[in-house]
Image: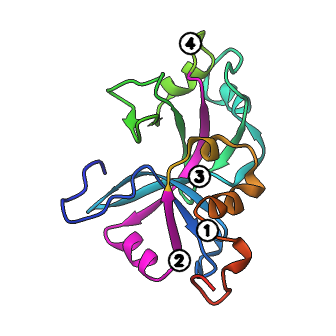
Amino acid sequence: MDHPTQDMQSFRGKILLATPAMDDPRFAFSVIYMIGHDASGAMGFIINKAKSGLNISDLLDQIGIEGSVNVADTPVLDGGPVDLDRGFVIHSLDYFKPETSLKVSESLGMTPTKDAMESLVSDTPPKQAIMAIGYAGWSAGQLEAEIADNAWLVSDGDDALIFSDDFAGKWATALSAIGIDPSSLSQSGGRA
């Protein structure tokens, strides 16, 4: 999911904001950071829903990593309903392994391996990192259809928003950043 076709707009590195037209309760009020989008489908992580009571440090023992987290020990994100047994680290590009990492934007990458978790306890961790369990995925054409049905608004990626720990406020903050008052969205779909 790296290279869009020339006639297709890629939402890689963008933010999706669920609108009231989103009829899937798993995605109501979601803010999703898109890490891949091409003609075969799309992939992203819900960045405003945390797994209750679970921080990055809580997972270290489970995956056999010793040490203390040397970046913010943030809550683990509930990244989406796909691959619920897999973890993914979204991180600044000061940590990047070409063989396992995906460059998502000019400042961020994603790595789905134990190596990324080990970097969080190293002496040279990425400056910023969050971890998600699971992801949101769309088959070919599905995301485009949902956007056409007004289920999502699209905005530019925003590192401050992505790494913010204000999970309850991210949706409203992201809408405000694109000039939309959340209360102006109608419950029947789209903007009021």
Residue on which disc 2 sits = 151
**Of the numbered discs in the image, which one, if any, rests on residue 79?**
3
Residue at the (18%, 60%) spot, across then down? 6
Asked whether the beta carbons under mark 2 and mark 4 sit within 8 Å of each other, the answer is no
Name the amino acid type tagged 4. Thr
Residue on which disc 4 sits = 124
Mark 3 vs mark 2: in front: 2
Q: In screen coordinates, is 130 left or right of 37?
A: right
Name the amino acid type tagged 3. Gly
**Of the numbered discs in the image, which one, if any, rests on residue 163?**
none
The x and y percentages for residue 18 are: 59, 70
In the displayed structure, 33 sits above or below 93; it is below
The x and y percentages for residue 96 are: 42, 25
In the displayed structure, 114 sits above or below 6; it is above
Q: Secondary structure at mark 3?
A: loop
In the displayed structure, 155 sits above or below 116; it is below
Specify whether residue 133 is painted magenta: yes
Task: Give the spatial CA distance, label 1 vs label 2.
Answer: 10 Å
Colour scheme of the picture: rainbow
Magenta range: 126-155
User: To which quarter of the image does residue 103 belong?
Assistant: top left
Q: Nearer the N terminus, badge 3 or badge 2?
A: 3
Q: Secondary structure at mark 2?
A: loop
Residue on which disc 1 sits = 27
